Amino acid sequence: MSSSYTKIYNLLRSSEANPYEDYLTEIIAPLFEQKNILISFFKEFASIDLIDIHDIKAHTQKTYTKLITHSTDSRPDLVITFRQGEIRKLVFVENKLSSGEGHLQLQRYQEHLQQSEKAGFSTHLFYITKYFDPKQIEKSSTPFCQLEWFQVFTWLQENYKADLYCKQILKYMEEIELNKSRTFLPQDVYSVQNLGKTISMLDQCLNGKTSYTFINFFGKPKQWGNRTIELRDNNRYVMKNDQSDWKFVGCGFTFEDSDYPEVAVFIEIHANSKHTAVLMSAFEEFEKINDGWVFQRPEDQNDWFMLYTSKSLIHFLAEKDHIEAIEQFFIDKLAELNKIKGNLSELKWIVNEQETLSTDEEVAI
């Protein structure tokens, strides 16, 4: 089940903008208004012990008018103000997920903070990124602290996972992959050692009889390299192809929704399809009359939806020949999925392997 924040984000997002950074900042900001969390954050990431702090406030997207040497105004993602005894504190936090630093962004922030120091503030500048993004900025009286989001995730998980609010934030951070592990567990080492053999066995399940059946029903799948792209981007090792009008058929192994890998056959539809209403109606009816098939409905009008069937890999381990049993599952379920084409013969389907994507669809994929 998705975190509350993912559900809210899905309601708010639009096809024109995808403001992950602003959204994460908004849900993280209230944490820093909690005295114990703010103290812990400074100790963990700035090696500073805060004592006697009060009047804590966290502001998001606060604009600072450009200085005479600046070309633009500045708007730090998060501005934290508080008092330590009689000392006024001003903290800028810049959050980066998929984007990089804006033009002279950190330099501008530093210069704004230096102006605030002249007004009696003690200042700090934090730069938190999803990916390694080393920065060298001029030394000044404003301490500059750079860290990555996996460090924040680890700190929250180790100290505040019992807090209900933090628990939802941690779950959301996992969903947007800010929880990257930094240690190899024994099972990870074993997996790496046997990676070649494992990939070879997965390919044996997908090639040969399965590939022959797939081509017979749905045309030639994408090249082998697409399986690794799917593994990187969607945590699944599958072969699939484009059936035109944003319809995609595939089969393979998924690694995300359960404790063990799932063996799956699916058809997924992008919201850009011209026939979403027809397809959703057909999937709903198909689910009713075909055991084991699930219609995963879209959460909003911009969301993908899919029809799929799957079994845990554990189910096949009792068979004498695991690969043969998995191949037979793929063959049987691809044959069942082929009924969709017969039920929706008025739609375009790709069987001829020479047919190619339109330019727009190819770019979007």
Image (cartoon, grey):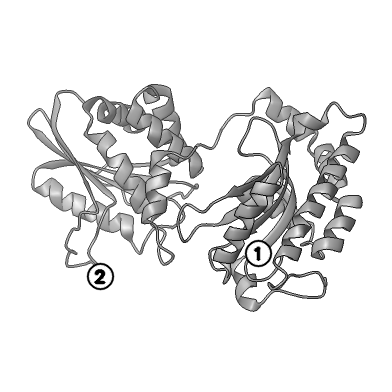
The first of marks 2 and 1 along the sequence is 2
User: At which x and y percent is residue 246?
Assistant: 62, 67
Left or right: residue 293 versus residue 305 is: right
Above/below status of 269 relative to 317 = below
Above/below status of 113 relative to 170 = below
Q: Residue shown at 24%/54% (left/top)? A: 61
In this view, the residue in front, 284 or 31, is 284
Q: Residue shown at 26%/27% (left/top)? A: 39
Left or right: residue 152 versus residue 25 is: right
Left or right: residue 7 versus residue 179 is: left
User: At which x and y percent is residue 6?
Assistant: 42, 45
Label 2 CA crowd tier, 10 Å (few <14, some 14–19, many 20+)? few
Left or right: residue 333 versus residue 94 is: right
Mark 2 touches mark 1? (CB < 8 Å): no
Q: Residue shown at 31%/31% (left/top)? A: 41
Query: Could you tell me how far apart the alpha carbons at marks 2 and 1 are, in whole angstroms?
Result: 46 Å
**Which quadrant of the structure image shows residue 204?**
top right
User: At which x and y percent is residue 182?
Assistant: 56, 32
Q: Residue shown at 54%/51% (left/top)? A: 297
Q: How many marks?
A: 2
For discs 2 and 1, the disc positioned in front in the rendered view: 1
In this view, the residue in front, 58 or 1, is 1
**Which quadrant of the structure image shows residue 364?**
bottom right
SS at circle 2: loop
* Residue topped by disc 2: 71
Quadrant housing the C terminus: bottom right
Residue 47 seen from this side: no
In this view, the residue in front, 246 or 229, is 246
Numbered mark located on residue 247 in the image: 1
User: At which x and y percent is residue 7?
Assistant: 41, 46
Give amino acid for label 1.
Answer: Lys
In this view, the residue in front, 87 or 313, is 313
